Image (cartoon, grey):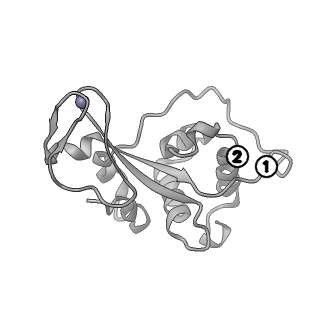
Amino acid sequence: MKKARFPIQSVKLFDWWLGTRRQNTLSSLNPLQFSLDCEIDVQHTLKLFSHAVFDPEIALLRRKYTVFCPRCTHKVFKSNDIIENNELHCDNCGTVIKPHLIQDFTELTFELLKVAQPLESNYPNLHPLGGAQGNAQSLRISDMNRYINNDDDIRRLYDCL
Ligand SMILES: [Zn+2]
């Protein structure tokens, strides 16, 4: 991560954050939670996550798109790269999700591919900010235009459609 010219402080926070996630959240990490917990700007956060996905030397995370049913929140579709632009059908309640609604109900999360090193001993001075930041909203595909801002690192996170 240092090679990608991120400030050392955000790399350390990222390491710390990954190392302190609960086991059951490691397959669906929410970048907005990192942003909230560590008080790091969302765009900077998404760049960090993008490099963690796409830099072959880092290859720390994998993207995961999950489409939820608008009515019953059942998981209708999952993918690591492409979301089909067809109608989707919820097996649980029978709702048909039209293609133009899919972006609104697709969450982007990230799966940790490597075990994070135990870090607390490495960074004795680094401490969570407060720790009572609460839960962040999920990151929706439909939010993307708000964050891309001509940034190719962020745009490539959203090349699923
Ligand atoms: Zn449903």
Q: Quadrant of residue 115?
A: bottom right
How far across and how far down the image is residue 97, in percent?
17, 40
- Badge 2, how many Cα within 10 Å: few under 14, some, many 20+? some
Residue at the spot of label 2: 19
Residue 100: x, y in percent?
Answer: 14, 47
Instruction: Quadrant for the C terminus, please.
Output: bottom left
Give the residue type that dot 2 points to: Gly
Residue 4 x %, y % = 60, 70
Rendered view: 123 above or below 75: below
Asked if the residue at tag 2 contacts the one at tag 1, i.e. Cβ–Cβ closer than 8 Å, the answer is yes
On screen, residue 24 above or below 54: above
Nearer the observer, 23 or 137? 23
* Residue drawn 14% across the image and 47% down it: 87
Q: Which amino acid type is shown beneath numbered disc 1?
A: Pro
Residue 102 drawn above or below residue 161: above
Q: Which residue is mark 1?
A: 118
What element does badge 2 sit on?
helix
Query: Which tag, 1 or 2, sits closer to the chain's start?
Result: 2
